[in-house]
Image (cartoon, rainbow, N blue to C red):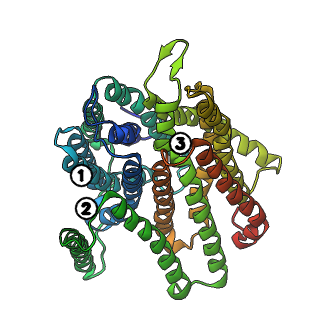
Amino acid sequence: MKSFFGHPPGLATLFFTEMWERFSYYGGRAMLILYMTAAVVGENPGLGLTVMEAGALYGLYTAVVYMTNLPGGWIADKFIGARNAVFYGGCIIALGNLMLAAPFGLPSFYSGLGLIAIGTGLLKPNVSTMVGSLYGQGDVRRDSAFSIFYMGINLGAFLAPLIAGYFGQNVNWRTGFLVVAIGMVLGLFQYKLGAKHLGDAGKLVRSGVPGEHEKQQKALRTGMLGALIAVIILLAVHFTGIMPLTVVSVSDLVGILLLVIPVVYFGFLFTKGGFDAAEKKRIVAIIIFYLAAALFWSAFEQAGSTLTLFADRNTHNSFLGMEFPSTWWQSINALFIIVLSGVFAWLWLKLNKMKMEPSTPMKFAIGLLLVGVGFLILVPAAIIIEKTGNRVGIHWLLMLYFIHTVGELFLSPVGLSAMTKLAPARIVGQMMGIWFLGAATGNFIGGRVGGMFESFPLKNIFLAIFIFSLVASLVMFLLVPWMKRLMGEVK
């Protein structure tokens, strides 16, 4: 292969690696809460967890998947290189999915989720880093390359629920998890076959500073020892009866961590970071964007919990007389992203030329409003279900997913860009990690809200999410002038 859409052939290798990794993640995510809540006996047995337990576990898993991106990037940079991290991560993900497919009950299931989280932390941040490494400084193709790469992400997210979800719901859940494991293995094969096109991208660069390698090794050993001690303490308090560990209690601990980590981190930046007044103003802007993003994802990521249960239990999943699995709904967002991304890229350019493009804080406010409006649309559907006991048509969820996708395009790409532009140069990498931490917080909250599916009337849940998002949006609207001043010259 001489080129890939005018780009280095190595981009094709990374495109398909990430496509299959996202196939693995989104295929598993589409089935996860349905498998956990399915009865242990029947035509397609599951784990028999309560919705509350399943929601807590779903939120815990998806949060940890994003949290592992932080150490995953650090391990690659300091010890094994991005190229090895991607391969090892893919192997661990494939093994994790095989554990989910194994008929060994909850121990196998928990182990599988843990392995997938670890593997994703190694693969996901580093495959993106390698895309940038294919291009020299000033290469005008770089932005286009990431657009193509982003298309691979959405292609995997679109195909996975259609294929894995079909096998999971129509054959059995374990076959569905086996399908996503096979997808990751295919990604690994093509990654190895295409490695010859990657040049030096992803190879470990050793620091030339004397003693630096030894310091890094010591930091790694200290981190591993700390993690081991934490696990031993948790097991001790569990088996001694001091605090028996349950899915919900472990999830609560992670929730506390998600609150404490950003508070401690930003507090350190302000007191010990050594930043000047202008940099501190931009860090305040970053904090507000971080909070807004976490609130947005907490509503948006109901897709894998609350909305999956709504699609499965309360929606008549039929189109032109053809029944389809409820997991297929998880493909809709990716499909809308593929269709609308180009439209929004054109729209921002057009509005910019007309000097009418909304500012980044305004885009955040609009994104928060739209994610709330999506849930407001479902309130009448929930009332119909409550009054008639019947399932509702697919148009309700179609409207929600369309509006949510538009909201995502207002907030997600511009938020990532704002983080890189606002962060002081020496902490840009850390700010990318903080952005992932916001997504982790949103996923965690999304899972916990999903656990309330059977505890409260649906209309109340949907209305509460709308009000929550509306208030956040109004606050962001009011903060726009102040945010512009904090951002200074950054647009």
**SS class of the residue under badge 3?**
helix
- Answer yes or no: do the residues labelled 3 and 1 have beta carbons within 8 Å? no
Crowd around label 1: few <14 · some 14–19 · many ≥20 (10 Å): some
Q: Quadrant of residue 159?
A: top left
> For the residues carrying marks 3 and 1, which lies nearer the camera in this image?
1
* Residue at 72 percent of width and 44 percent of height: 349
Image position of 144 (left or right of 489) = left
* Numbered badge on residue 147: 3
Q: Quadrant of residue 421?
A: bottom right
Where 109 sits versus 270, above or below? above
> For the residues carrying marks 2 and 1, which lies nearer the camera in this image?
1
Q: Earlier in the sequence, mark 3 or mark 1?
A: 1
Which is nearer the eye, 230 or 264?
230
Q: Earlier in the sequence, mark 2 or mark 1?
A: 2
**Relative image position of residue 22 (x, y in whole percent):** 39, 41
Image position of 153 (left or right of 174) = right
Which is nearer the eye, 323 or 380?
380
Q: Earlier in the sequence, mark 3 or mark 2?
A: 2
- Spatial separation of the CA atoms under disc 3 and disc 1: 25 Å
**Relative image position of residue 60 (x, y in whole percent):** 38, 56
- Answer yes or no: do the residues labelled 3 and 2 have beta carbons within 8 Å? no
Q: Which residue is mark 1?
A: 88
Three-letter amino acid code of the residue under disc 3: Ser
* Residue at 52 percent of width and 46 percent of height: 302
Image position of 68 (left or right of 148) = left
Q: Which residue is mark 2?
A: 80
- Spatial separation of the CA atoms under disc 2 and disc 1: 10 Å
- Answer yes or no: do the residues labelled 2 and 1 have beta carbons within 8 Å? yes
Three-letter amino acid code of the residue under disc 1: Tyr
